[in-house]
Amino acid sequence: MFRFVGNNPITGFDVLGLWNTCGHNSLINSAFGTGASDGFQLPKGDLNQLKNASHDVDSGPGSQEPANAYQHGMSSPGEDPARAKADADKFIADQLKSAIDAENQGKHDEAMYDLGKGMHTIADRSSPSHRGEQSWPGMGITHWPNAAFHAMRELWPSRSKRNEVVNNPHDYYNSFQNGCDGGGQ
Ligand SMILES: [Zn+2]
């Protein structure tokens, strides 16, 4: 029997997205944890903000609705994939700008949280099954077997896939750092 939590019968599953919460956290650890490459090892508090933000993108009100599909690198039914891509690009850019603004105001935790939301979209859209912002049918129960399979299939990315996927969050973090170093607005 399913126990529904919001729109999401299985807590922690990112139905629209590439990874479930554990998968997202694993990628954040790979990109910014103790084993991360030089210059990308962040304090635990920063990691937690990134993880909280990622979790909230998947679990907040309406987070798994088709209208918010772009936040997971997907388009909603009938939507022009180019439009979904543009929405995702804008979301990622807006989160970066918010993060830089917050950091410049001394609100570091808030900055990391904003950055984490943009990073979630970056991670989701890097899935092979998401490339091209493919359409997602939404949250009808009839689609659940496919949704669950989709989530399970990509639960744990291979090591080589993870290495590929961490490069994009690293670029994003560099943009954040450069924006906060007085390198312009
Ligand atoms: Zn997602």
Image (cartoon, rainbow, N blue to C red):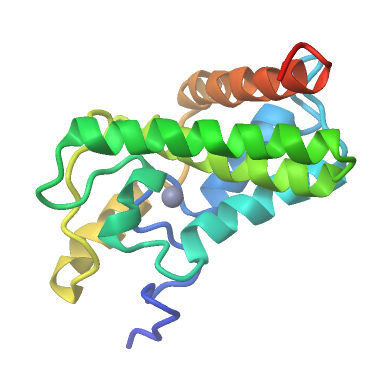
**Which residue is drawn at the image coordinates 70% and 48% (left, top)?**
113
Q: Looking at the image, is 7 positioned above or below residue 153?
A: below
Q: Nearer the viewer, residue 181 or 54?
A: 181
Q: Nearer the viewer, residue 92 or 49?
A: 92
The image quadrant of residue 24 is top right
Residue 134: where, in percent of width, then height? 19, 39
Number of marks in the rendered image: 0
Q: Nearer the viewer, residue 153 or 19?
A: 19
Residue with the most extreme left position: 78
On the picture, is 63 further left or further right than 150? right
Residue 175: where, in percent of width, then height? 66, 19
The image quadrant of residue 111 is top right
Q: Looking at the image, is 180 positioned above or below residue 79?
A: above
On the picture, is 71 further left or further right than 102? left
Residue 149: where, in percent of width, then height? 27, 56
**Which residue is drawn at the image coordinates 66% and 50% (left, top)?**
51
Q: Looking at the image, is 59 positioned above or below residue 107?
A: below
Placement of the N terminus among the 4 image quadrants: bottom left
